[in-house]
Image (cartoon, rainbow, N blue to C red):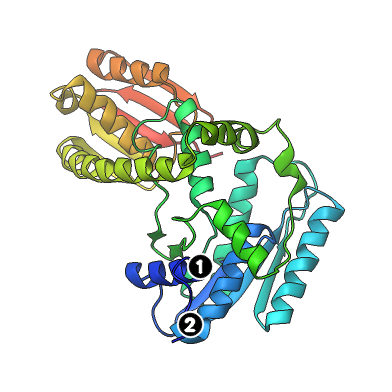
Amino acid sequence: MKKYSQKSLIYKVRSLIKEQGMVKEGDGLLLGLSGGPDSVCLFDILDTLKDELKFELAVAHYNHRQRGEESDADEKFVISLAKSRGVRCFIGQNKSTRKISEDEARNLRYAFLGKSLGEWSGDVLVLAHNQNDLAETLLLNLIRGAGILGLSSIPLRRKKIIRPLLKFGRQEVLEHLLTQKIKYRLDSSNENLNFSRNRIRNKVIPELQTINKQATANIFKAAEHLSSESALLFELMEKELKMVLISKNKNRFELDVRKIQDLSPSLITALIRYILFGLSLNKDVSSKHYLAIYQMIIKNIGNKKITPNKNLLVSLNKGIIRIERIIN
């Protein structure tokens, strides 16, 4: 086993992979490789460790075609980098050049990564999120009024997805790339302050770091604490849900209003939040909407409908409250 300095990022990532049991001998790892510093850094580390840890490595790149020649240059860079290391590379492209939202881009990218993992018969999808990404997400959710579930940590591993860089900051990533003299691409759209995440990345977090140099690391710790609390909340909500549930499927929950009314006000709201979070329908649901749903349950009068966002319908009919996804 090759020795690395305990201060080096490759040593820390290797230790985390082993501690968390992220990878098994013989696994096929597919890394989402954008060409940016985070994914290029992780690519270099995984490529260095693949023989020692005995896993196969491939990469996948999705060209969103949102930045013209710059997007195409990113794609060419990734293909060249993968070829130089003898690593198989999957390439996907958005068929349209129309402007798409961050959510649309993410959905397209993840769909392509999942398809590529299956095509390659791989075992694990690897993403290059780091501490800064988590801090940005937590702060975004915080200013949107998210509850404990929305402020929890991004998981190090979930099903087939692992994030070996999550415990480490962007500065460590850049230091690794500088030390190893590895080139990478920069996304010019990350400087566009019209995007909320970019303002947090380029304005808010640097300001927080003038107050406390360990700001991102401490936000990460706070998110981990919240994850522990949310795990307990999940257990409680599962028990309460069984007591009031009439039926459910992947797009709909039906609940007995009379049984829900026996719960405390805070538990009722927490249960609704939990269901919406499980259906991935909690985005853009404000405290005003939760209050309206709560009052619908407590009053239990007539037929009522609320549509907090374009994808969500909450309705009351004959003592049954239905929470469902709107399928267009």
280 vs 31, left or right, is left
Q: Does the rendering let one see residue 307? A: yes
Q: Which quarter shows the C terminus? A: top right
- Of the pair 103 and 295, the residue shown nearer to us: 103
Query: Does residue 322 lie above or below 15 as drawn?
Result: above
- Disc 2 residue type? Phe
According to the picture, the residue beneath numbered tag 2 turns out to be: 55
Query: Does residue 108 lie above or below 147 as drawn?
Result: below
Residue drawn at x 57%, y 31% as measured from the top left: 207
According to the picture, the residue beneath numbered tag 1 turns out to be: 8
Query: Does residue 194 lie above or below 183 as drawn?
Result: above
Residue drawn at x 47%, y 39% as measured from the top left: 215
Residue drawn at x 39%, y 66% as measured from the top left: 16
Choose top left, top right, bottom left or bottom right for residue 101: top right
Within 10 Å of disc 1 (Cα), the crowding (few <14, some 14-19, many 20+) is: few
Label 1, label 2: how many angstroms apart (C-alpha)? 21 Å
Choose top left, top right, bottom left or bottom right for residue 24: bottom left
- Of the pair 240 and 23, the residue shown nearer to us: 23
Residue 201, percent across and down? 60, 38
Residue drawn at x 76%, y 55% as measured from the top left: 95
Residue 165: numbered disc: none
316 vs 183, left or right, is left
150 vs 317, left or right, is right
Residue 150, percent across and down? 40, 37
Q: Secondary structure at mark 2?
A: loop
Query: Does residue 235 lie above or below 6 as drawn?
Result: above
Q: Does the rendering let one see residue 38? A: no
